Image: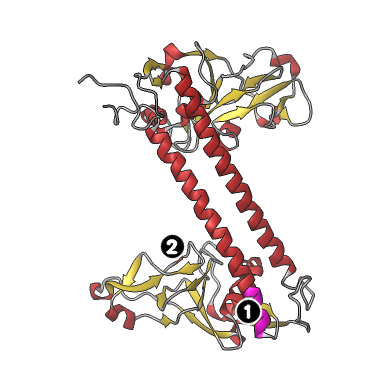
Amino acid sequence: MATKNAPKLRFKGFTEDWEEKEYSATFLPLNNNTLSRAQLNYDEGSTKNVHYGDVLIKFREYLDVLKEELPYINDEKIADKFSLLEDGDIVMADAAEDETVGKCTELLNVSNERVVAGLHTIACRPFFSFANRYLGYFLNAPVFHNQLLHLMQGTKVLSISKTAIKDTVIYYPEFDEQTQIGDFFRNIDNLINANQNKLDKLKNIKKACLEKMFPRKGASTPETRFKGFSGEWEEKNIKNIGIVVTGNTPSKSELTYWGGDFIWVTAQDMKNKYINNSILKLTNAGKLKSRVIPTNSILVTCIASIGLNAINNQECATNQQINTIICNSDYYHEYVYYAIEHRIELLKNLAGQTAVPIINKSTFEDFAIVSPISKNEQTQIGTYFQNLDNLISKNEQQLEKLKNIKKACLEKMFVNKEYTI
C-alpha cells in the first residue's frame, strides 16, 4: 500500500491525502527591521512593530492586531523601508535562549493598520490561501518545530536562518479541513484562557484574603473576621507554637537504608501543599536513622529554597533542608500553615543575601506569626483557606488537563511521517 499523507487523528468526512510542499515553495520571504526596544514606544505612531520577544513570550499561535497591544516605531522616516504585513502573514522568532526559537504567530485582522516585522524575526507570506489560524497552529506544532531542531545554531543563544529553513516541509489538507483544525485549536485555547483567568482570579482572591484576614503590620486585629469572634490577636514565636525538628540524611552509602516505602522528604518533593509521596524512600533500617515526624506537621524549607511550605498527610522524615513544626494542642496546623504563608516574605528575608540562603534552627524558632487566642477561630480561618486552596488546585488540574489535550492534538492532528499509514 502506498504511503499516505494523513494525520493519525482527523475530523469525520475527510479522507483526501494532505499536500506536501517545501517551505520555499509555500512562502514568499518578507523583509524585517532590526530596531531595538529603545526605538519603539507604546504611546503614538503610525507603524506598529512585531518584536521577536513578544512572539516568544506574549503572542499566541495567531496575533489579532485589533486586540493585541503592539509598539510603534519612533522614527516614521524609516518605517516605509519595511514590508507591510497582511492577514495570513507569518512572523517567526529567529533567536531565543532555548529551543523555543522558531516559535511564530499568524497575523489576523490587520485591517488598515500598518504593521511590520521587527528585530530577530523571519517574516513570510503564503503564495496561496490558507484558512485562518491553520498555519499558526501547524508551524508551532511538533511536526514542524522538530524539523528546526537540527537547524538551530549557537550555544548561549540559539538561532535559525531563512536559508536553513527553506527546505523544511509544510503539510496541509483541503481548505475546509484546515478551517476545522484552526477552529478546533482556537476553541481549546479559549477554554485554556478562560480557565487561566479563573485561576488567576482565585489566586488574587486568596492573596487579598491573606492580607485582610490576618492583622496588618502594627495592628492587633484583622480587617475581616468571622462573626462571633473578638479580642486582640497575639504574636507568638514558632518555639511557643510547637516543637521544631530539623531533618537529617541517613548515610547514602548504606544501601540497606534506602529503597523501602517510608517517605523521606526533600525540597524537590514539596511541589504541592500536601506531602503524600517522595522521590526517595527509606527502609525500616533507614527510618531508625532518620528523624520521624507525625502526620499534620508543617514542613518549611530553610536552606536554599527558602519558604516552601507543606503539610504531611502521613508519618514521614525529612532532610536537613527542612525544619518541621509539630504543633501543640492549642494550635490548628492548617491555620499555622497559612499564618506562615502570610509572613513568608519576612521569613525569606531572615536568610540574608548569602550564596546559599539559610535560616538556622534557632532563628526559625524565634520567627513570629500572629494568631487569635481562640482555636475555634484558627480552625475557621484554616478551613476557609484550605477550601480555597482545594478550589485553586482543582482549577490547576483542569488547566493542566486542557493543556495536555492541546499538546496531544498538536501531535496527532497534523501529518507526521511517524504516523503515516
Left of 331 or right of it: where is 149? left
In the rendered image, which quarter is residue 281 located in?
A: bottom left
> Depth check: 182 or 98 in front?
182
Q: Amino acid at mark 1?
A: Thr
Q: Amino acid at mark 2?
A: Gln
Res 307 label: none
Q: Residue at x 67, y 56 (%)?
A: 204
Q: Is residue 379 magenta?
A: yes
**Residue 351 visible in the displayed image:** no
Give the vertical position of 136 relative to 290 (above or below).
above
Give the vertical position of 256 relative to 49 (above or below).
below
Res 268 label: 2
Stretch in magenta: 375-382
Q: Which residue is mark 1?
A: 379
Q: Residue at x 61, y 73 (%)?
A: 383
Give the vertical position of 384 relative to 184 (above or below).
below
| Quarter of the figure with the C terminus | top left
Q: Residue 98's spot in the image, x, y percent?
A: 46, 38
